Amino acid sequence: MSFQISLEPGGQQFQADSNQTILEAALAAGLVLPYGCRDGACGACKGKVLHGEVALAGSATALSDADRAAGMTLFCSAHARSDLVLEARNVSRTGDIPVKKLPCRVQRLTRVAPDVMVIELKLPASEPFRFRAGQYVDFLLADGRRRSFSIANAPQREDAMELHVRLVAGGKFTEHVFNGMKERDILRFEGPLGSFGLHEGSTAPVVLLAGGTGFAPIKSIVEQAIHAGTTRPMTLYWGSRRRDGLYMDELARSWEQTLPGFRYIPVLSEAGAQDDWHGRTGLVHRAVIEDLPDLSAHEVYACGSPAMIDAARNELTTLCGLPQDAFFADAFTFATDAAR
């Protein structure tokens, strides 16, 4: 059965089969709704059901009881059960960047922390790969599963790609990266995917909030800003448990000299004597609250675990006046044998 979906305030319309999620149907129709994880964890695809009925499938951890009571849903998990009118902002067309399935070759493996590997991939010279800073790719595994990782380099390089992979205990793919993967290995991926990234046209000051390897898409965004000569004020808060988790600390510090208006604030939540740490401590989003108690004119771009994303969204909007539609997130799930 097929249903008519109408989007407000833009007026876009498309059809959705009952076995498709609203997000899948929109993408198939050439419309990009805001989305990130595609498994109900990040809340990037949250929108309001103005008319009609939907059913949620799978995990929907980013949807609170208060959200449900207010008529909100997650487009990545919701299936239409009638014709729908939905409130969805920041909708765009797929444009001229196609999603491709491509081979790639492992060019370099660099262990930058005990549990973080930087993978540099060589892409086919005959088929340039284009993406927007903040997007991600899915590795296509032999058993049909997918594993998602954010692109860490700026889009100017079409022949190479950098990924940051955290070792997950029991994670089949990440354990292979650390224990079995070799230079010159061939992999296949699909991308670019996701709508996370700096919103063009805005002049609002930017807060970049990264937890662990959530630094990867933030790195892409900052390097793109440097390339484009962006003048918007940017402050990066990068949180980790221990000092070795700030695995590109020197690079982040160098951006203060490279990008006008850029500030970098590292934060450790479990600093010990062996860390020799004299910087900020505690939860990374709490550092933002301490420094910027009024976020009413800012935009926040957050990447990290679902727990970090949820806490940051709730507290920055309720305590600091950040508008709900000025919080943009991409959640990384680190469950056993999981994805990003």
Image (cartoon, helix red, strand yellow):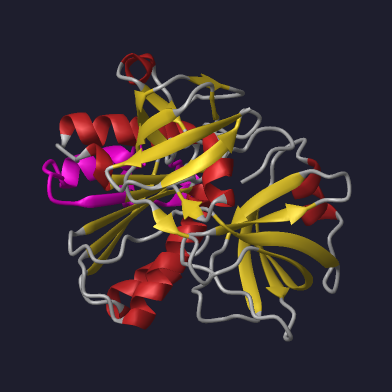
- Regarding residue 296, the answer to whether it shows in the image is yes
Instruction: Please identify the residue farthest to the bottom as the structure is shown.
Output: 126
Q: Is residue 282 left or right of residue 111?
A: left
Determine the image quadrant of residue 320: top left
Q: Does 35 sit above or below residue 86?
A: below
- Viewer-closest of 13 and 125: 13
In the image, is residue 112 above or below residue 273?
below
Q: Specify whether residue 276 is painted magenta.
A: yes
Q: Quadrant of residue 138?
A: bottom right
- In the rendered image, residue 48 lying in the magenta stretch gets the answer no
Instruction: Residue 214: give x, y in percent of width and height.
Output: 49, 51
Horizontal and vertical percent for residue 30?
52, 56
Relative height, residue 245 to residue 5 (above, below): below
Q: In front: 137, or 302? A: 137
Q: Quadrant of the N terminus?
A: top right
Residue 325 falls left or right of residue 181: left
As drawn, 116 above or below 227: above
Residue 307 locus on image (x, y percent): 45, 31
Q: Which residues are magenta?
A: 271-300
Give the residue at x 44% y 54%: 196
